């Protein structure tokens, strides 16, 4: 439709529209110009800074984990070179297809494949994910050669945790493992959160690695990097590096040589051993067999191996010296002897043992069927006569026995920095009231129960560490407290200045004399455990802890020997000792699970361990100092 140029009304409408349209464009142009002026001139510095922040990112540099060394500087935990493979999901395209391509060169089990996909989803596909670590050089080289056909794959050389002594120190050192969602949810500052999200980063999962995580982790470094529009690093800015600080070194009381020796002695058994310096409380040996190799956890333990470790009847994942609780058996008899003297029983008091003791409505049997004849207190310890100590049980109040047991360290846990320590049980009236709080009718303490406790049975349980502490306190007369960490970086932890116990030296001497007779006199239950070096005298006590109550019918049939019973129903074998007798310096406890008899199976193992300790005599050697940990690295391996 044409506009008639001679029509004034229509010409006026067109002119008005043109003015409005032109004005609108002018206002829009003015607004855009004003905004451009604001962005490019007035706020230039602000947006220049934001642009630079988009162009440059800060990359966290993970620190090396602190080393753990033994009392003389030998390396127990360190770091070694690790060949690993990362996947950049945003470069890989189809992640499933990328993982399938990688699986042609490295093994990725199905369960791990699922975990990787979950981790990629958790990081929203923007962060690198560790596919495999601890690659052999040949596999690492082949992956590098095939990189053009593996989109998203990034081979890398990093550091990983290494435990040179393997299973020998597994329960002391612990191990490290992958970061979990729970770790990420824990309160952390921003830098620590970023550090925890680094691919393959590990944190302490057990033992000292877990307790001293903060000290061992170190301080992360940082470096500025130039990135493209997709956030991919295209250049590292070398002069922007803030170097990481390695974690602090832990110096322990453990002696690596003696630890290895003890593990060899216990090999093939489900057993534990603990050796303590009776003057300082320093733990020299804390051995548990069978054990696991903590190095497998740094690689990622296969599910079938994890299941095997958990289901084994020999409990390779249990820290037996600290977490295993056992009836102390006859090793408890020194406590009963001391309690009897405190109650006024003269150590010369004697009892005729004919092999059984009638109390209440039944016989309590001695381990020696034909009996021991007449024995006094020291002789009863020497022969481990049950009848003598049953008799003491009729003369003593259970709370008096419990008081001595507590004084000697039973029922107590100690600040070692290793999780999983158990209290054990020291029976008393108060304990029974608490244990049966919901059933008042079971809270009554019966006299027959005291007889069982007097020989270390009944409800009584203790850990091998507690038995070693008990022996050290008997030997020294001091309330020593064990420790296992001596140094944290440049800080030397205070040595225990143990006070003398409120136990009579005369009473302790009777217990010591009985222990001497056990090993060094004819008829003692552990004469086969005497030391070959006649200059050293070992004082000890055997123990056989019943885990299955033999019925009268089985006793009549003669089924009382351990070899006749299935392994899990056999008695535990125990032995505690100290040496040298005339000047005690070291105390030891050995527990062999279902080992049948302390004299035959635990005593000789304790003898061999103590022989190694006395031959080396680490108390005469100068341990590493705090100053040495703040200078050059003190860690040394057996190869170096």
Image: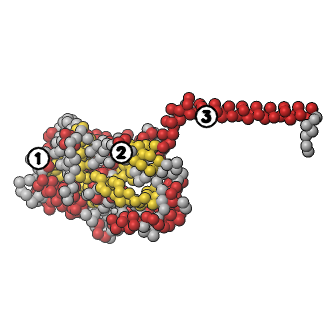
Query: How far across and how far down the image is residue 513, in percent?
Result: 13, 48
Q: Nearer the viewer, mark 1 or mark 3?
A: 3
Of all residues, the one furthest to the front in this rendering is 6
Is 442 left or right of 334, judged from the image as shown? Answer: right
Where is residue 15 shown, x and y percent of the image? 84, 33
Dot placed on the residue nearer the N-terminal end, 1 or 2: 2
- On residue 323, which mark appears? none
- Residue 425, relative to residue 24: is it above or below? below
Label 2: which secondary element = helix
Which label belongs to residue 36?
3
Measure how far apart labels 1 and 2 are at the Cα level: 50 Å
Q: State the image coordinates of residue 56 (x, y, percent, origin top left).
A: 46, 43
Considering every residue shown, the one lying at the far top of the view is 42
The residue that appears at 16% across and 45% down in the rendered structure is 623
> Looking at the figure, which quarter contains the C terminus?
bottom left
- Left or right: 112 in relation to 1: left
**Whether label 1 touches label 2, CB < 8 Å:** no
Please tell me the numbered disc located at residue 620: 1
Name the quadrant containing residue 16: top right
Mark 1 lies on a secondary structure that is helix
Q: Tell me the number on the disc at residue 238.
A: 2
- The answer to which image quadrant residue 38 occupies is top right
- CA separation, marks 2 and 3? 36 Å
Q: Earlier in the sequence, mark 2 or mark 3?
A: 3
Q: Residue at x 34, y 46 (%)?
A: 63
Direction left: furthest residue: 535
Mark positioned earlier in the residue sequence (1 or 3): 3
Circles 1 and 3 in contact, beta carbons < 8 Å: no
The residue drawn where x is 81% and y is 34% is 18
**x and y percentages locating residue 94 in the rendered image:** 55, 62
């Amino acid at each position: 439709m044409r506009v008639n140029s001679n029509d004034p009304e229509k010409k006026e409408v067109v002119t008005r529209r043109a003015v409005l349209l032109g004005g609108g464009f002018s206002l829009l142009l003015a607004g855009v110009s004003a905004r451009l002026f604001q962005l490019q001139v007035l706020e230039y510095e602000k947006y220049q800074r934001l642009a630079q922040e988009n162009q440059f990112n800060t990359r966290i540099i993970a620190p090396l984990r602190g080393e753990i060394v033994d009392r003389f500087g030998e390396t127990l935990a360190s770091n070694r070179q690790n060949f690993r493979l990362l996947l950049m999901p945003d470069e890989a395209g189809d992640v499933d297809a990328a993982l399938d391509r990688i699986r042609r060169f490295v093994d990725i089990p199905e369960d791990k494949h699922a975990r990787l996909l979950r981790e990629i989803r958790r990081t929203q596909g923007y962060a690198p994910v560790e596919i495999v670590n601890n690659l052999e050089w040949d596999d690492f080289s082949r992956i590098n050669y095939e990189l053009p056909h593996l989109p998203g794959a990034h081979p890398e050389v990093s550091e990983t945790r290494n435990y040179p002594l393997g299973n020998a120190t597994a329960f002391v050192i612990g191990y490290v493992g992958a970061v979990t969602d729970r770790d990420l949810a824990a309160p952390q500052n921003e830098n620590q959160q970023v550090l925890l999200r680094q691919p393959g980063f590990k944190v302490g999962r057990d033992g000292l690695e877990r307790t001293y995580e903060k000290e061992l982790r170190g301080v992360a470094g940082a470096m500025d990097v130039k990135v493209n529009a997709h956030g991919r690093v295209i250049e590292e800015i070398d002069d922007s590096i803030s170097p990481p600080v390695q974690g602090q070194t832990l110096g322990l009381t453990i002696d690596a040589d003696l630890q290895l020796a003890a593990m060899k002695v216990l090999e093939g058994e489900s057993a534990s051993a603990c050796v303590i310096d009776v003057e300082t409380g320093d733990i020299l040996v804390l051995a548990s067999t069978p054990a696991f190799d903590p190095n497998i956890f740094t690689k990622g333990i296969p599910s079938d191996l994890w299941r095997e470790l958990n289901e084994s009847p020999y409990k390779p994942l249990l820290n037996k010296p600290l977490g295993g609780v056992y009836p102390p058996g006859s090793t408890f008899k020194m406590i009963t002897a001391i309690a009897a003297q405190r109650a006024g029983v003269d150590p010369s008091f004697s009892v005729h043992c004919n092999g059984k003791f009638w109390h209440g409505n039944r016989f309590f049997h001695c381990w020696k069927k034909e009996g021991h004849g007449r024995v006094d207190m020291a002789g009863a310890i020497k022969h481990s006569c049950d009848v003598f100590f049953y008799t003491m049980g009729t003369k003593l109040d259970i709370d008096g026995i419990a008081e001595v047991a507590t004084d000697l360290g039973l029922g107590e846990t100690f600040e070692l920095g290793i999780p999983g320590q158990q209290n054990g049980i020291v029976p008393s009236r108060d304990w029974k009231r608490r244990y049966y709080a919901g059933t008042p009718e079971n809270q009554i303490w019966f006299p027959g129960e005291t007889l069982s406790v007097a020989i270390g049975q009944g409800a009584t349980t203790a850990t091998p560490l507690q038995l070693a502490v008990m022996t050290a306190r008997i030997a020294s007369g001091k309330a020593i407290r064990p420790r296992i960490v001596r140094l944290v970086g440049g800080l030397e932890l205070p040595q225990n200045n143990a006070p003398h116990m409120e136990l009579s030296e005369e009473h302790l001497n009777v217990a010591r004399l009985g222990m001497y007779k056990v090993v060094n006199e004819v008829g003692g239950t552990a004469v086969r455990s005497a030391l070959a070096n006649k200059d050293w005298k070992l004082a000890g006590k055997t123990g056989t802890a019943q885990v299955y109550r033999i019925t009268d019918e089985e006793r009549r049939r003669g089924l009382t020997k351990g070899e006749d019973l299935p392994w899990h129903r056999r008695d535990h074998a125990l032995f505690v000792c100290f040496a040298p007798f005339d000047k005690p310096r070291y105390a030891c406890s050995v527990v062999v699970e279902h080992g049948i008899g302390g004299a035959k199976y635990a005593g000789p193992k304790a003898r061999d361990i103590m022989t190694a300790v006395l031959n080396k005599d680490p108390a005469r050697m100068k341990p590493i100092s705090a100053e040495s940990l703040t200078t050059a690295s003190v860690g040394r391996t057996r190869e170096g």
